Image (tube, helix red, strand yellow):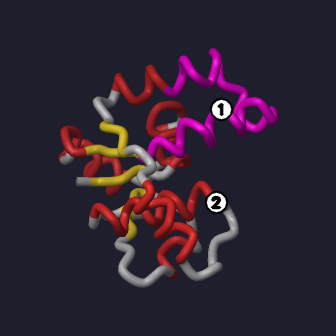
Amino acid sequence: MLLLDTCALLMLAGRREDIPDKVIKKLTAQADELFISTISSFEIVLKNRLGKLGLPMSAEEWYCKAVEGYAIEEIPVSSAIAMKSASLPFLHKDPCDRIIIATALEHRMPIITADQIIPQYAGIKVIW
């Protein structure tokens, strides 16, 4: 089981060449075990609305196509995840990343990410 962070999904479905080969191999080997937090849908729509992504279609359509196209299973943001996110040390200021970290901890999954702050959290396994 692998949890993709938002940037990993954006790269996987749009800029695969930016993902290291070893990570692509891992994603391919576990293609039927890919997960994403529903907070990523919020983050993608918000970033696109702010003009930071330049997606070729609406962010909503892009997200749905990416998740369906790669058979990625969504993990809803539960109250347990929300509370765990709020209880994390303030190493990461981004609330979306904090929810992704809490999701990984709650479900005991490694995170596919290039983020340099996420590995600083105790109990988090990062692949990248």
Q: Is residue 73 above or below residue 90?
A: above
Q: Residues within 10 Å of mark 1 (few under 14, many from 20)?
A: some
Image mark for residue 31: none
Residue 47 shown in magenta? yes
Q: Report the magenta residues as a range.
A: 37-63
Residue sitting farthest toward the right = 50
Q: Secondary structure at mark 2?
A: helix
Coordinates of residue 59 in the picture (x, y in percent): 62, 24
Q: Residue at x 44, y 65 (%)?
A: 102
Coordinates of residue 65 in the picture (x, y in percent): 44, 20
Q: Is residue 37 above or below residue 53?
A: below
Q: Nearer the viewer, residue 28 or 71?
A: 71
Image mark for residue 45: 1
Q: Residue at x 56, y 64 (%)?
A: 98
Q: Earlier in the sequence, mark 2 or mark 1?
A: 1
Image mark for residue 95: 2
Q: Quadrant of residue 105?
A: bottom left
Q: Is residue 123 left or right of residue 49?
A: left
Q: Secondary structure at mark 1?
A: helix
For the C terminus, the image quarter is bottom left
Coordinates of residue 111 in the picture (x, y in percent): 39, 61
Q: Is residue 117 above or below residue 69?
A: below
Three-letter code for the amino acid on which mark 2 is drawn: Pro
Three-letter code for the amino acid on which mark 1 is drawn: Val
Residue 61 shown in magenta? yes
Q: How many marks?
A: 2
Q: Nearer the viewer, residue 72 or 24?
A: 72
Coordinates of residue 37 in the picture (x, y in percent): 43, 47
Q: Is residue 110 above or below residue 61?
A: below
**How far apart, in angstroms, are the residues tagged by discs 2 and 1?**
15 Å
